[in-house]
């Protein structure tokens, strides 16, 4: 948190995440940063404006109802409704991973415009067209990011799609933890990343009092 607060004061910082913007605000309170939430389906730019994308609400409702029934039949599974998306978590039931994949495939089959995104012990169904990479592109066209070199850090398979996009625009990419990656660098864990960021923040000029 200290590293994030320091970087937010001295540089252009955005959070790009699968979580909701509200959740990020709660985690970082009282900081309110630019955030791309729900894998880019909702995005708050630095001026505070919320940008959304069209959502297939009808398809999402149908899939959510089917997944709710599936979760009722399988204790330990968790459904997380988000704006424009629903996440099926199987962290407490890893034995059901294959069944979850099959159920999500069956439920989404009638809706080719829904996107299924596998994450860490979770399957996300997105009912709109957005991605972390596209959200980064959008941030990079706006103040205070435009003209700066992007530096993107991620720890999940859902971050992999964004690494090449950042690299192609001259940026630097870091993967936290294990796993195959397209990132340029790897930090062993959040502690190592925090040390790097704290050191980096100290190299920036102090804001005038
Ligand atoms: O894009 P991220 O910031 O990496 O967010 C990805 C997902 O994070 C959350 O799920 C993950 O954390 C849970 C614990 O808080 C864990 O139980 C789960 O297995 C992880 O996938 C969040 O709940 C999802 O909505 C995000 O998409």
Image (tube, grey):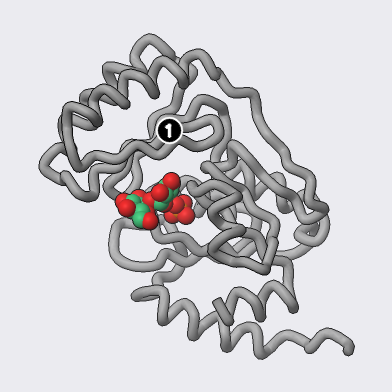
State the residue at coordinates (74%, 77%). 9
Q: Answer with left or right where residue 98 lies relative to residue 154.
A: left
State the residue at coordinates (63%, 40%). 42
Q: Answer with left or right where residue 57 lies relative to residue 5.
A: left
State the residue at coordinates (41%, 80%). 191
Q: What percent of the width, then of the height, locates residue 145? A: 76, 60
Residue underneath mark 1: 86
- The quadrant of the rendering that contains the C terminus is bottom right
Figure label count = 1
- The quadrant of the rendering that contains the N terminus is bottom right
Q: What percent of the width, then of the height, locates residue 116? A: 39, 30
Q: Is residue 36 above or below residue 74?
A: below
State the residue at coordinates (50%, 49%). 19
User: Residue most toward the left?
Assistant: 95
User: Residue most toward the top?
Assistant: 110
Q: What percent of the width, then of the height, locates residue 86? A: 43, 33
Residue 40 picture quarter: top right
Q: What percent of the width, then of the height, locates residue 197? A: 56, 80
Q: Is residue 147 above or below residue 197?
A: above
* Ligand 1 closer than 8 Å to label 1 CB: no
* Crowd rating for badge 1 (residues with CA inside 10 Å; few <14, some 14–19, many 20+): many
Q: Is residue 122 above or below residue 47?
A: above
State the residue in front, 19 or 113: 19
Q: Secondary structure at mark 1?
A: strand
User: Residue most toward the right?
Assistant: 209
Residue 125 picture quarter: top left
Q: Answer with left or right where residue 196 lies relative to residue 181.
A: right
Q: Is residue 3 above or below residue 160?
A: below
State the residue in front, 182 or 37: 37
């Amino acid at each position: 948190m200290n590293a994030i607060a320091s970087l937010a004061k001295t540089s252009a910082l955005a959070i790009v995440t699968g979580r909701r913007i509200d959740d990020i605000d709660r985690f970082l309170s009282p900081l309110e940063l630019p955030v791309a939430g729900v894998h880019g389906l909702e995005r708050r730019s630095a001026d505070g404006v919320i940008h959304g994308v069209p959502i297939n609400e009808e398809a999402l409702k149908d899939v959510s109802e089917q997944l709710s029934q599936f979760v009722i039949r399988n204790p330990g599974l968790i459904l997380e409704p988000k704006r424009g998306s629903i996440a099926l978590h199987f962290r407490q039931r890893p034995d059901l991973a294959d069944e979850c994949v099959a159920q999500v495939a069956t439920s989404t089959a009638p809706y080719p415009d829904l996107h299924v995104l596998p994450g860490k012990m979770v399957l996300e169904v997105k009912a709109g067209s957005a991605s972390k990479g596209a959200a980064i592109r959008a941030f990079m066209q706006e103040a205070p990011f435009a003209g700066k070199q992007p530096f993107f850090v991620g720890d999940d398979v859902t971050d992999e799609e964004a690494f090449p996009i950042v690299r192609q625009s001259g940026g630097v990419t870091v993967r936290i933890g294990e796993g195959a990656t397209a990132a340029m660098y790897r930090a062993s864990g959040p502690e190592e990343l925090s040390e790097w960021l704290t050191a980096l923040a100290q190299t920036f000029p102090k804001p005038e009092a």
